Image (cartoon, rainbow, N blue to C red):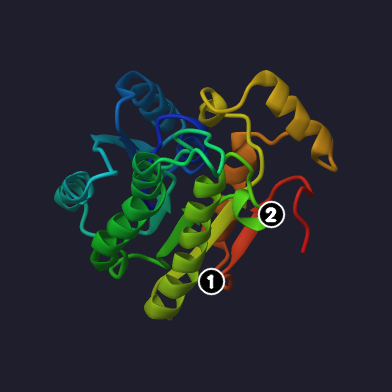
C-alpha cells in the first residue's frame, strides 16, 4: 500500500492518475476550486479499492502549498509518490502581447507550485518505500509554442528542475518527468478551439490526440520501475522525436 499525493487531481491527467493508481493505495486528491469534480474522483478511487483524501489548496501561493502539505502531514507519516500535476496555460498571448501579470500567473501555477510542494514533501518522501516524484512538463518545451511561449518556457524550467532535484535527492528518492503532447482534457477548454485541436491531430504522426490515461499509465510505469531516474518521458504520439 502506497501513500500518493497528486496535485491538480480533480480533472484531466491528475484525475486519471488518481484512479489509475487507486487500487490498494491512499490517494490525496488535491483540488483548488473544483470540489464537486474532486469528490467524483475521490468516489471513484474508493470504488477501485483505494482510500481517498480530498484536500483543497491554491498552490499558486506559498500559503496554499504549506496548507496542502500541513494537511498531508496530519494524515500520514510518509509519502511514496508525489505527482506534481497542477498546471495550466492560463492564456494564449503572442510574443508582442505578453503581459507581466500573465507571466507571473503561469510561472506561479506551473513552476513555483511544484517547486514549493516538492521541497515541503521531501521529509515525508524520505520515509517512503521506494519513494519517487513525477513532474508534468509538456511537448511545448521541446519545439516552441507560438502564442504559448511563456507556458513552454515554464515547462522548460520545470524540466530543468526535475534533473536538479534528481541529482540532489539521489539515491534515496527517484525523480522523473512526463512531457505530454496534446492530451484532450479540460486543460484545452479555454485556450484551444475545436479547430486548433483538429490541427494538432493532423500534425501528429499517429493522426490522433492523446487521452489522460496515456499519461497516467506512464506515471504508473515510472512509479514501478526503480531504475529510471532523472528522465523525462515524452508521450506525444510522435509530435516530437529524439
Q: Which residue shows up at 33% across the image and 48% down it?
A: 108
Q: Residues within 10 Å of mark 2 (few under 14, many from 20)?
A: few
Q: Secondary structure at mark 2?
A: helix
Q: Is the C-beta separation of discs 1 and 2 under 8 Å?
A: no
Q: Which mark is residue 143?
A: 2
Q: Quadrant of residue 203?
A: top right
Say whether residue 216 is left or right of residue 166: right
**Residue 41 drawn above or below residue 9:** above
x and y percentages locating residue 158 in the rendered image: 46, 59
Q: Secondary structure at mark 1?
A: loop
The residue closer to the viewer here, 2 or 147, is: 147
x and y percentages locating residue 38 in the rendered image: 36, 27
Say whether residue 207 is left or right of residue 67: right
Work out whether residue 136 can be spotted: no
**Residue 119 drawn above or below residue 168:** above
Say whether residue 158 is left or right of residue 188: left
Q: Which mark is residue 230?
A: 1
**Residue 48 drawn above or below residue 242:** above
Amino acid at each position: 500500500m502506497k501513500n500518493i499525493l497528486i496535485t491538480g487531481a480533480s480533472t484531466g491527467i491528475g484525475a486519471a492518475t488518481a484512479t489509475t493508481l487507486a487500487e490498494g493505495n491512499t490517494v490525496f486528491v488535491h483540488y483548488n476550486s473544483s470540489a464537486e469534480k474532486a469528490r467524483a474522483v475521490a468516489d471513484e478511487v474508493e470504488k477501485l479499492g483505494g482510500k481517498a483524501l480530498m484536500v483543497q489548496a491554491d498552490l499558486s501561493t506559498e500559503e496554499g502549498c504549506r496548507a496542502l502539505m500541513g494537511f498531508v502531514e496530519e494524515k500520514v507519516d510518509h509519502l511514496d509518490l508525489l505527482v506534481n500535476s497542477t498546471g495550466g496555460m492560463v492564456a494564449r498571448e503572442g510574443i508582442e502581447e505578453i503581459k507581466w501579470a500573465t507571466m507571473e500567473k503561469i510561472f506561479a501555477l506551473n513552476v513555483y507550485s511544484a517547486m514549493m510542494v516538492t521541497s515541503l514533501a521531501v521529509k515525508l518522501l524520505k520515509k517512503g518505500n521506494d519513494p519517487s516524484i513525477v513532474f508534468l512538463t509538456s511537448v511545448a518545451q521541446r519545439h516552441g509554442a507560438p502564442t504559448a511561449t511563456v507556458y513552454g518556457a515554464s515547462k522548460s524550467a520545470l524540466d530543468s528542475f526535475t534533473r536538479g532535484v534528481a541529482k540532489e535527492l539521489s539515491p534515496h528518492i527517484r525523480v522523473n518527468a512526463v512531457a505530454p503532447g496534446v492530451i484532450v482534457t479540460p486543460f484545452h477548454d479555454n485556450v484551444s478551439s475545436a479547430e486548433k485541436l483538429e490541427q494538432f491531430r493532423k500534425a501528429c504522426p499517429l493522426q490522433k490526440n492523446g487521452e489522460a490515461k496515456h499519461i497516467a499509465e506512464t506515471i504508473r510505469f515510472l512509479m514501478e520501475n526503480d531504475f529510471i531516474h532523472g528522465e523525462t518521458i515524452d508521450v506525444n504520439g510522435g509530435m516530437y522525436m529524439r
